[in-house]
Amino acid sequence: MSNDGSRGSVAPADEEPGPAAGPRRHLRTVVGVVFLVVVVALAVVAVLRDRVKFAAALAEIGWGAVALSGLLAAGAVAASYAVWAQVLRSLSAEMPRRASVPVFFISQLGKYLPGSVWPVLAQMEAGRAHRIPRRSMVAANLLTLLVLLAVAVAVACALLPLGSTEALHRFWWLFLALPVLLVLAHPRVLPAVLDRAFRLVRQPPLDTPLRMGPLVGALGWSLLSWVLFGGHLAVLCAGLGYTGISVLVLCTGAMALAVTVGILFIPAPAGAGLREGALLLALSPLLVEEQGLVVALTSRVELVVVDLALAGLGAAFGAAVRLSRTAPVR
């Protein structure tokens, strides 16, 4: 986790000219508010669109299982925040926790817009307020994604052969990406690749060696995140009467596969459609099609609700910090 008080280095290319700072800051605030309203509205629509089917699924699985599954999903998303925080530390560009918590959870709502650039754009703007160069925030986002994907593909490769060989056969090409992801995530490779890309667009190089300790920590948090995601799915299956360690193993591999497929299909908001298709295929040895649809739908709605709830809590946390800093001392 990040510690309060550490900041990244200042880059001349990222500094704001003094006279224009006020209007530009105001414009960024307005754009940020509009962006947030749009993505929250789209996320709410995603929940309301399936409310009837979700109500039926809720009745079949049970309130208790759905509530526990939601808590595990929230833990999984929180663990992904820890991955990002550790990656920032590895780049010596960490943000104070009072800023990084709202930034991360609010920016994650951007995945409900088509494309995958919105979260990183939001994080880049937040990094400017803490004098972290844009290129460092871009690198942090890419490295976080690489760590999560590399661990997810490794988990899927290890666990799916134990319970869902059909999914493994269908998505065999995806697992060829594992060596590439691992190489890119190496502390020496990614900075070199990014520096070359920055030079091509005439930007200063990253010029920051990755610290190995925080990067190993990011890998550990990523593994925990996927285990919690698997638990989130396994609890839903338990509500339908399927229990045991083999169910948890299958669900963890299925969730790692499904989310990876959703992430790699950039045009779809939050991997909509593809994630559910991969999930149904991976769970087919355990669940009949109707049960698989119930579990996939419930998981999708839960994750949207979790993202909205964590973004709201993050915003409230950020507002509380700002109020405490501006409150008069008695």
Image (spheres, rainbow, N blue to C red):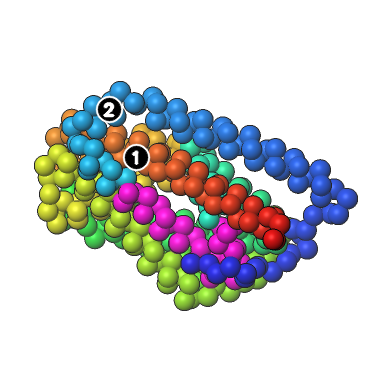
Q: Which amino acid does label 2 sit on?
A: Ala
- Pinpoint residue 94: horizontal percent, then vertical percent: 58, 66
- Pinpoint residue 117: horizontal percent, then vertical percent: 56, 45
Q: Which residue is drawn at 81% across and 43% down?
A: 23
- The answer to whether residue 190 is visible is no
Question: Range of the magenta residues?
Answer: 71-100
- Vertical placement of residue 301 versus 74, above or below: above
Secondary structure under the numbered disc 2 in the rendered image? helix
Q: How far apart are marks 2 and 1 (CA)?
A: 12 Å
Dividing the picture into quarters, in which one does residue 216 lie?
bottom left
- Is 45 left or right of 66, judged from the image as shown? right
Q: Which residue is drawn at 40% across and 58% down?
A: 79
Would you call the spot at circle 2 few (<14 residues within 10 Å), some (14-19), or many (20 or more)?
Answer: few
Which label is found at residue 55?
2
Dividing the picture into quarters, in which one does residue 300 lie?
top left
Q: What residue type is labelled 1?
A: Glu
N-term mark: 2 or 1: 2
Which label is found at residue 302?
1
- Pinpoint residue 140: horizontal percent, then vertical percent: 55, 60
- The answer to whether residue 72 is visible is yes
Q: Which residue is drawn at 46% across and 70% down?
A: 215
Would you call the spot at circle 1 few (<14 residues within 10 Å), some (14-19), or many (20 or more)?
Answer: many
